[in-house]
Image: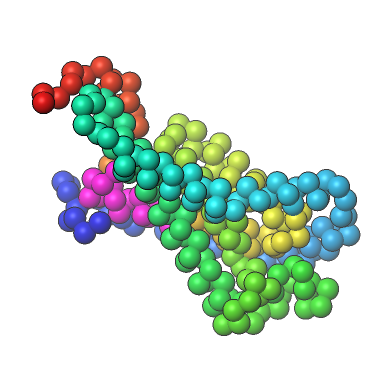
Amino acid sequence: MWRAPIGSPSPVWTRQLTLLVLGGACAVGLLFFIDSAAMDFVLSNRNRLTNWLAWLSDVGKSEWYLFPAFLVYVATATADWRGVGYGFKARLVTLFGQAAFVFGCVAVTGIAVNIVKIFVGRARPAFYGEYGAYYFDPFVVTRYSSSFPSGHATTLGTVAAILMIWFPRHWLLIAIVGLMLSALRIPAAAHYPSDVNAGYLFGLIVTIVIARFFAARRVGFRPVPGKLLPAATGLGRWKWQSAKPREPR
């Protein structure tokens, strides 16, 4: 982490990120004005479909991604790397680094968004009938005043950013699917639309910034000139790495 940037300067923060933040802030602000109407509609149309969507919205729980990433990290860290070819070692290195990145990003964004929740203190939709959609009580640490931003949406924004880096050709599809899955928290009556949008953008942007930080130092990633998303080192070379000769013993 503390390695100095390598090669030509590659700024972590870019104009594209600034535009993304500004556009996202505008979207959150606009959604804020329809939060009440959206929750009125959701609460007056509860049925089996909304119950099923509420169950499906649990795809945003962080443990679904933390545990597998941790298991891959431990498995690659404790594997016997001796006596294997260069290609297999390269794959282990890639899995080791990317698993650590997934675990770290999901954990960091999850902790960070919970800190933001404390500062905002927005009441959850469970209290919509009592307080409405715009009740804020900052610095009250309870799960009932932790609506903004959505933690599930933050996790999905983080995962979407990681998948966009891994599969850059499909970045738009991944971003849309991730946002749609995040939006399931609205029919689940767990969050308002602005909560979901803010959480998704928070996870997405923080993860991209972390990846760009590592890319500037050639740790697991490398910068792509003119592109917002860095490239994950090693993922695109798995096929030809396995054909390389073994290292001399």
Q: Which of 78 and 119 is in front in this view?
A: 78
Quadrant the N terminus occupies: bottom left
Q: Nearer the viewer, residue 65 or 228?
A: 65
Which residue is found at the position 68% from the left and 50% from the top? 57
Q: Which residue extends farthest left?
A: 248
Dominant secondary structure, magenta: helix
Point out the stretch of residues depicted in magenta.
206-220
Q: Does residue 33 appear to the left or right of 84 in the view shown?
A: right
Q: Can residue 95 be seen in this snapshot?
A: yes
In the image, residue 105 sits, relative to residue 114, either above or below, namely above
Q: Where is residue 68 in the image (x, y as percent from the top left)?
A: 48, 44
Q: In which quarter of the image is residue 242?
A: top left
Q: Which of 102 and 30 is in front in this view?
A: 102
Which residue is found at the position 87% from the left and 55% from the top? 46
Which residue is found at the position 73% from the left and 64% from the top? 35
Q: Can residue 28 be seen in this snapshot?
A: no
Does 176 appear in magenta?
no
Q: Does residue 185 appear to the left or right of 25 in the view shown?
A: right
Q: Position of residue 215 (x, y in %)?
A: 28, 47
Q: Does residue 79 appear to the left or right of 174 in the view shown?
A: left
Does 219 appear in magenta?
yes
Q: Quadrant of residue 71?
A: top left
Q: Where is residue 85 in the image (x, y as percent from the top left)?
A: 23, 24
Quadrant the C terminus occupies: top left
Q: How many labels does the image show?
A: 0
Tell me how the rendering is colored.
rainbow
